[in-house]
Amino acid sequence: MNHYGIIMAGGGGTRFWPLSRQRTPKQLLNLDGKELMINEAIDRMSMVIGKSLIFIVTSDIQAPAMIRATEGRVFPGNILAEPAARNTAACIGYAAIEITRKYGDGVMVFTPADHYIEDVDELAKIFRTAILTAEAHDKIVTIGLNPTHPATGFGYIKYDKQAAEDVKPVIEFKEKPDEQTAKNYIESGQYAWNSGMFIWKASLILQKLKEYTPDIYEALNLIGDAINTPREQEVLHEIYPTIRNISIDYAVMEPSAKNGDVLVIPGDCGWNDVGSWDMMNILHAQDEDKNILLGDVVAIDTKNSVIYSSSRTVTAVGVDNIVIVETPDAVMVCPKDKAQDVKKIVDALKASGREELL
């Protein structure tokens, strides 16, 4: 059976504005000073999947930059471009229908493009176990990360801790909790962070979409019928934007878990979803004042701050708990504990028609 690696890379990464833009979102940035996030994701995937069977799902607007950025790592024909952002159920279904119609059924390993993994060897080991499990059973397999603190920004997976096998039955998925609930989850020892990584047979995920979201499956089937015909792109652009906007968690994972069809592999690979500027300490060491200073920065009496300069000298005096980001056409300043709200700036710019800053 074929093994396919699919990297989901269509997000806007708006919380990293102004560095992240529509055409160069977070996954196309080098945030750790080593490599683009998308290329790090490809290199991790290539430890378990052959190069010719690694695919990227991105957006139409990002596709040209994605092809350039991944040259030599992914074949251009393996970069699938979504005509519109329709959430992860559509993204995953599109990849499944495209790949099965062109290459046949197989086990698919889905991962986001923008995660940080400290122990890539351990992740590869978990992937191998997941692939073998998905091959042997008609079950959805997901990866749960051992929680290190009561995070409120992640979803959680409740699983049967008493199960003897390394791969555990999932009881239910939980959305992002408040802090006290997250503490309760961790104290119980029955919960893992939802990593957003999934492993399943392509035929199985299409079957689940047909069962739980028949409207989405019908649209995907119309797209599938046009694959390998002259009308493939025309039908894709006509049908895809009409697909219901829903995440794979709501569409498939939650109802499948209730029916006992989801397994989880709890693990620890040093995973983190570096989602906003306040989390840069995951990628960079802090100085003695707990600052992260990147680029041409002069900071005096400054503490607990993230300051990023891309082109000009940025200076700060006597500030605490601040994020400052400079690019050639914009400067963003916010309290560090409000970094999640940077996306509101993007929303405001969009509403005022400031397309040149998006």
Image (cartoon, rainbow, N blue to C red):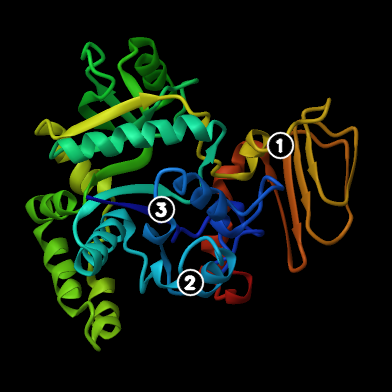
* Residue 197: % across, % down: 36, 41
* Residue 189: % across, % down: 34, 13
Residue type, mark 3 in image: Gly
Within 10 Å of disc 3 (Cα), the crowding (few <14, some 14-19, many 20+) is few
Residue type, mark 2 in image: Ala
Q: Earlier in the sequence, mark 2 or mark 3?
A: 3
For the residues marked 2 and 3, what is the alpha-carbon distance in whole angstroms? 22 Å
Mark 3 element type: loop
Say which residue label 2 marks. Answer: 63
Mark 1 element type: loop
Say which residue label 1 marks. Answer: 284
Query: Would you say residue 325 is visible in this rendering?
Result: yes
* Residue 267: % across, % down: 40, 25
Q: Is residue 41 left or right of residue 245?
A: right
Tell me: residue 47, above or below residue 154: below
Quarter of the picture holding the C terminus: bottom right
Number of numbered discs present?
3
Tell me: residue 303, above or below residue 238: above
For the residues marked 2 and 1, what is the alpha-carbon distance in whole angstroms? 29 Å
Do the numbered discs 2 and 1 sit on residues whose CB atoms are within 8 Å? Answer: no
Q: Nearer the viewer, residue 293 or 50?
A: 50
For residue 50, the mark is 3
Residue type, mark 1 in image: His
Do the numbered discs 2 and 3 sit on residues whose CB atoms are within 8 Å? Answer: no
Q: Earlier in the sequence, mark 2 or mark 1?
A: 2
Q: Which picture quadrant has residue 21?
A: bottom right
- Of labels 3 and 1, the one closer to you: 3
Residue drawn 67% across the image and 45% down it: 32
Farthest-out residue, bottom: 230
Q: Which picture quadrant has residue 292?
A: top right
